[in-house]
Image (cartoon, rainbow, N blue to C red):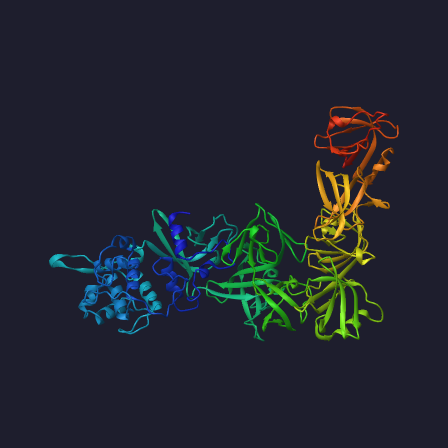
Amino acid sequence: MNNLKKQVLSAAVAASTVLSLIPAASAAIPADVKGTRYEEPVQILAALEIMVGDENGEFRLDDTIIRSEVAKLAIHTMGLEDAAESSKGQTIFYDVPTDHWANGYINLAVSQGIIEGDGDGNFRPNDPITYAEAMTIMVQATGYTISAEQNGGYPHGFVKVGTSNGLAKNVQGSTYDEISRGNVAYLATNALEVPLMEQTGFGSDGRYEITDKTLLKDRLKVTKGTGQVTAIENTSLTGSSKLSENQVEIDEKLFETAYNMNDLLGYNVEYYVKEENANSAIILAMPLKNQNSDLKISSDLFSKLTKKNGNDAVEYFKDENSSKTTIAEIAPDAVLIFNGKRADMDTSLIDMSDKSGTLTLLDTNKDNKYDIAFVRSYENIVVDTVSATKISDKYSDTTLRLDENVDFTLLKGLEEIKLSDLKEYDVLSVYASLDKDLYEIAVTTKTVEGKVTNKNGDGLLINNERYKVAPNYTNTITVGSEGVFHLDIDNKIAAVDASTTLSSNYGYLTRAYYLQNEDKANFRIFTMDNKEVTFDGNDKIKFNGKSGVKAEEVVKTINGEGETEKQLVTYTINSANKLSAIDTATDNTATGEVISDKFTKNYVLEDAKYSKSLSKLGNVRIDEKTVIFDVQDSTDEYAIRDMSVLEDKQKYNAIVYDMTDNYTAKAIVLTNAQFSATASAPLAVVKEVTSAANEEDEQTDLLIALVNGEEVSLYAESENVLVKGEGKLEKGDLIQYKTNSKDEIVSVRILQDINDKETESIKTPDEDLVTVYGRVTRKFSSSLNVSVNDEADANYNVPEEAKIYVVDTTKSKNNVTVGDMSDIQIYDEEDGNRVFLKIYEDVVKEIVVIK
């Protein structure tokens, strides 16, 4: 981008992008200007850097304006802002010292003869300026001082001349009234195109003539034109386009632009071109008044396609409260722009009854038929996961792929963002061209948190506001549903996160009972803290969403006619450490449907195989947030697990709770878990098993072993883990183990019992795991020949990274050590030396020499 473009882009607040979702021209209009009568002059002055907003970007158009501000505005209007910088440093007026922000502007304005002080040596820079004073400055800035003097001078002569020259057009005020900022904007804009008066004769022939020069054209080097925008980047009114970003064609003439003008395609516009250093660019374009008639119809207000005068037409409601429809006629040769690219006219594409978005119709020739139709149709994607080039949807199997072959823009408000900026639950309203080559994506993060208190045909009432549900969200939302509701670009509910309000304090209820003599209820719950706790109940408990239920009634409902059914619940403990709320799961196992705002039992899985690569148990996802209750016959064996205990390809019985829309379980109860070490787990050579107290001061066993060539010490989860038969593991036993999230051993797989050191064997504990225990018959630099039970030799390659250990039962101490290749010897019957090989996926991982 050349320097001119950079300057104008900043000046015009052109934070627009290549998207036409947010019209660039309207995006440059400050909020306190849009919709007022001052829109046009403010846009022009902002583009020319003559008038800018305050530190908040506001123009405060109804406020008065002070004398120093008008001095600066006049200097900019005359194109003398650079000269103002070199005019700093003088003190012409007592009240305008050298460090005053407007010192240079005021000094230059005085030297140009367009402004003066009060006659007492002061300028009064902070005083509001009057209508007559402001008019006088602009009359002098355009060269008409002599004419004004001839008409009576200040104030009436200047007001008279300014009015006759067109300076007063749209300017409201009286001679001595203070003038507002908005009216000064009109005054300055009018001054830009007043023909300048210049002195053409000097001395005795002091003549003044009105020229064809203007401040706009000759001082600011800006020309003005009109025409129709016929092409932009990506498309044109006649077909494709080869224009680059920030280029347009107006009446088929190519222009560079200082900001994006895609939203003006098809419109008849007035445009301003600035010349600077042999470069030119359009700094502002605005639809021409009375030369465009446009009609914007949202999909909610679209009724149907119809006919009028033999032409295609659309029937629509003017607003949400209208009961009658209006018909808009479409010209027979109308052009269709669908999501940013021209397409062949097809009435099905302008039928908004099955779409989300807007249909904008444009009449550019004032024949009451719309000759251009713009369809902005989007589909929502709610972010579940994001990778470098892909976005997966939370509510469907849709994956949006955005790689280097796709032209796409991601816009959050007016800011262009990257894929890596996206977060879970961000709502993407995706506008895709028909050929899927162009994607314009609006990202919204707007939410409303609360409860649905009413539901009717007009939508859901949340916090006394009515919200419609977007088509992408198909789950049932009922009255009473609570959560965070995520909204799309049209403020429709596109996603619901009930996890923020739905209790996730899970517990496994083992018993509920009521003590009549003490008049209180007790609830025995195995908690997520891995402990079984008995809680006293409040006198009144919130039960399954209903408040004020007597504790005795809660117990009776849970127990029915018999004993307590052991089950997963959610519960709340108050500040008095009493159970104040409890929910039993809504049984939805018949359909498995997700109910995002209720504690739900979704599935009962039997023999469901776990896939480690997919993190799925059956068809249900498990992640690091999933709470896993391991429930065995005895409560002594209950435990809280994490996904690391699930072994690849092993089958489990499980009950799935609170499944999310992407089939991820928030909680599961395992009922037959036999946790085994994974086949890939490293070999552990036992050195010692001893009784010990763990970090929570609980009595358990401690394993000391060699693992990955180093000695490790690990606590067992309980005293019944590090066992074989009726006793504990022994020195020299070869095992694999599995740990929980606290790095405690929860299970072991015995690969070789040291007591069976005389028994040779080949075993397959798992389809990917083989163990060989036999005699070395030959040894090579990187392989061994091993015979098992005097069968034929087999050769095994020994990788350099294979770990080697020695278990020497002939020694009384230091008999379990890390070894190397030199410790492996050919079998000697007197020594009885054998080798144990652990082979995983056909590769020798560890070797143990046993003597």
Is residue 598 in view from this perspective? no
Residue in view at x 51 percent, y 57 percent: 20
Near-viewer residue (138 or 327): 138
Q: Quadrant of residue 600?
A: bottom right
Please determine whether, in this image, residue 247 is positioned above or below residue 144.
Answer: above
Q: Quadrant of residue 567?
A: bottom right
Decide if residue 775 is on the left or right side of residue 398: right
Is residue 567 in view from this perspective? yes
In the rendered image, residue 120, in percent from the top left (x then y), is placed at 18, 67
In the rendered image, residue 100, in percent from the top left (x then y), is placed at 28, 59
Decide if residue 250 is on the left or right side of residue 515: left
Badge count: 0
Residue in view at x 40 percent, y 50 percent: 6
Q: Quadrant of residue 175?
A: bottom left
Residue in view at x 38 percent, y 52 percent: 7
In the rendered image, residue 623, in percent from the top left (x then y), is placed at 69, 53
Near-viewer residue (382 or 527): 527
* Image quadrant where one finds the C terminus: top right
In the rendered image, residue 741, in percent from the top left (x then y), is placed at 70, 50
Near-viewer residue (656 or 203): 656
Query: As drawn, which residue projects farthest toward the front?
Result: 812
Near-viewer residue (117 or 12): 117
